[in-house]
Amino acid sequence: MAFIGLLRSAACRGIACQTQSLQTLSRTSLISPQILKSSFTNHTLPGFSRLQPGRINQVQFFSLSPKSYSAGAGHNHSKLWTIERALSAVLILVVPAALAAPSKALDTVLAVTLVMHSHWGVEAAVVDYVRPIIFGNAFPKVALGGVYVLSIVTLAGLLQIIYTDIGLANTVKKIWSL
Amino acid sequence: MAFCCSRLLASTHLKSTPSILLRGLYTSPRCLATMKVMPYKPPAKEGHDERNMRLNRPLSPHLLIYSPQLTSMLSITHRMTGLALTAYMTGIALGALMLPQPLSAYLAAASLSSGTIFVGKFIMAFPFAYHFTNGVRHLVWDMGKALTIKEVYSTGYVMLGISAVITLLLMGI
């Protein structure tokens, strides 16, 4: 999981270096615990070590396991990915159920899940195609904001159909019976 | 030293050079590698796209000359059908918000030709059937199953068949 490296401070700058417990560190390295303690006392982030300028040959742990690495960068999308899959799986059941037995409750569940699912889909497409290298730095942000606005407006419209009109499933059925 | 000479031999220019000259190069002091300490310079930050644009590289794969494969075609169709379904949903929602009467009133008053209804149903039924069926295929992949090339192709054909059947069933309702 963790790699021990004898690294010069300049080479490791910019990498989120994760420290292990001092015990492990002193067990696996030849540096005395006193020196280790002094180099790990003034951390700004708990669990992360800062390389100190002027020190050479510091023992540093940096983790290459996906979880710790993404946590170090401040972005962990693995949970969102799981939620997206779960929502897609839920839709397999919700869509036929809402059409088979139309009700305000099922329609509302359908509206919320459909809008979330399509929002993530469109967002992914916009991130893929509306890239800063082609459109400049400003427009991709505007486009992404537009996706949020459209998703919110869509949900509002669907809720209006559910609560002031015949409902979502019935609207689809009516279109189909034209 | 060895590295330097092997590189010289590898160059096509020197392959045709007489062996006497080569021998001279072998012993030339210029060939000796010198090492000196340089301050570390971090590489310039440049993204994948930026680098390719600076080097005038074409988009890879070049979509116009690249042979269409089942895998890539099914993949892009999945995204296109999803976007189409989103467009219909947003259209219906915007209609409900902006039209003066409730949507059902317009649907009750609508009188469309059978051709329009057929085309309209098809452009809704096919994207739904395709996106639904291929979505299940994607979820199977996400569980780590059916990921060999052979399985990706076979499930692709099965998915096309099932979505065609669902489209026909929906059109028939």
Image (cartoon, rainbow, N blue to C red):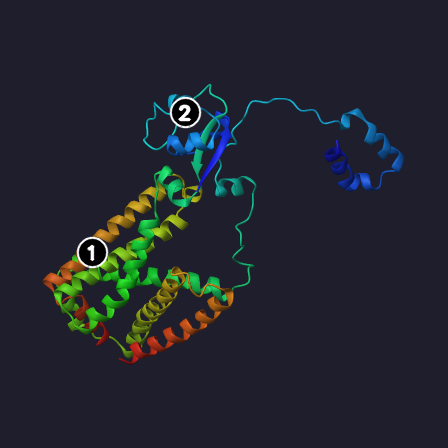
Instruction: Give the quadrant of residue A110.
Output: bottom left
Could you tell whether B60 is left or right of A151 in the image? right
Label 2 Cα crowd, 10 Å radius (few <14 / some 14-19 / many 20+): some
Number of marks present in the image shown: 2
Rendered-image quadrant of the N terminus of chain B: top right
Residue located farthest toward the left when viewing the structure as drawn: A164
Q: CA distance from mark 1 to mark 2?
A: 59 Å
Label 1 Cα crowd, 10 Å radius (few <14 / some 14-19 / many 20+): many
Type of residue at label 2?
Pro
Q: Are marks 1 and 2 on the same chain?
A: yes
* Chain ID, mark 1: A
- Which residue lies under the disc numbered 1? A155
- Estimate the x, y position of residue B111 in percent, counting from the top left: 21, 75
User: Of the residues tagged 1 and 2, which is closer to the observer?
Assistant: 2
x 52%, y 57%: residue = B63
Could you tell whether B4 is left or right of A133 in the image? right
* Chain ID, mark 2: A
Type of residue at label 1?
Leu
Front residue of A121/B26: it is B26
Does residue B119 sit above or below A129 in this rendering? below
Front residue of A96/A72: it is A72
Q: Which mark is residue A23?
A: none
- Estimate the x, y position of residue A40 in percent, counting from the top left: 37, 25
Q: Secondary structure at mark 2?
A: helix
Q: Earlier in the sequence, mark 1 or mark 2?
A: 2
Residue located farthest toward the top when viewing the structure as drawn: A54
Front residue of B44/B105: it is B44
Instruction: Give the quadrant of residue B6.
Output: top right
- Estimate the x, y position of residue A95 in percent, counting from the top left: 24, 67
Rendered-image quadrant of the C terminus of chain B: bottom left
Q: Which mark is residue A33?
A: 2
